[in-house]
Amino acid sequence: MLSVLLVGALMCAGAAFWVLRAYRQAGGGARTAFPALAACAVVAIATLGAYLLIGHPELAGGAYADRLAALKQRDITTYSVDEALAILHEAARDNPDDPLPHFYTGQLLLNQGRPHEAARAFDAALRREPRLAEAMMGLGRAMVRIEQGRVTPEALALFQQAGELTDDPAPWIYQAMAATEGGRNADARRLWGEALARMSADDPRREMAQRMARGGT
């Protein structure tokens, strides 16, 4: 619905321009044009107010506050992605210092193939909790997605920091990938070994990690 709001704003701006132009062509000055321009401004403000009252980009139909209240009564497993994002948006607004709503927003967006938006959400989580390893990994993954699979130096730095804070093997896998991309095969084997050491016995990635740690492909 944000696009509708944008179009409305552009239309109001265009209307104000044509009103002013007509007054000038008719010989009127800025003082005589002011009442009409003020009317345009009132219309624009009213449009914005109506949107904020009854609209929200994540939820369709009905007043936002009423829809959100009804949504909270439902089982969270029934939420659509947009509904879950709306709930997280409110949680972030109500708890501005809490990193978790931003982190979970990032996870949802990344799973939806929206890495740029996900990166912003993970960054917001890290601004609130700089040592949140899961958000570091999320931001790193979003960067890798944006770069179409390449582990950039910035993403690598995030994975290295996360690796110091968690036993999750994922940061080490990405570090190994970066080493392989850079032609540092010995480092890649060592890093795959680090990832393997952190994997549970039933981790489906164990076979691959074992092969890569031995220098396989």
Image (cartoon, rainbow, N blue to C red):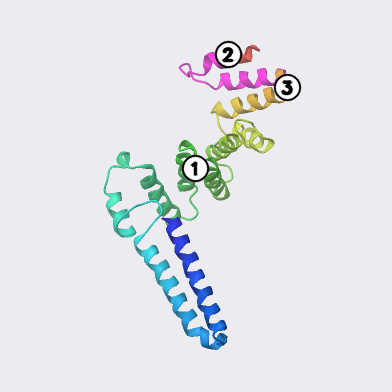
Q: Nearer the viewer, residue 154 or 125?
A: 154
**In terms of secondary structure, where does tag 2 sit?**
helix
Please tell me whether mark 1 or mark 2 is closer to you in this view. Answer: 1
Q: CA distance from mark 3 to mark 2?
A: 19 Å
**What amino acid is at disc 3?**
Gly
**In terms of secondary structure, where does tag 1 sit?**
helix
> The magenta stretch spans which residues?
186-209
Mark 1 or mark 2: name the one nearer the start of the chain.
1
Q: Which residue is mark 2?
A: 210
Per the picture, the main secondary structure of the magenta-coloured stretch is helix
**What amino acid is at disc 1?**
Gly
Query: In the drawing, what numbered circle is on residue 183?
Result: 3
Location of the C terminus by quadrant is top right
Query: What residue do we see at 56% from left, 38% from top?
Result: 142
Query: What residue do we see at 44% from left, 71% from top?
Result: 44
What is the crowding at mark 3: few (fewer than 14 residues within 10 Å), some, or many (at least 20)? few
Q: Are marks 1 and 2 in contact (CB under 8 Å)?
A: no
Q: Which residue is mark 1?
A: 106
Mark 3 or mark 1: name the one nearer the start of the chain.
1
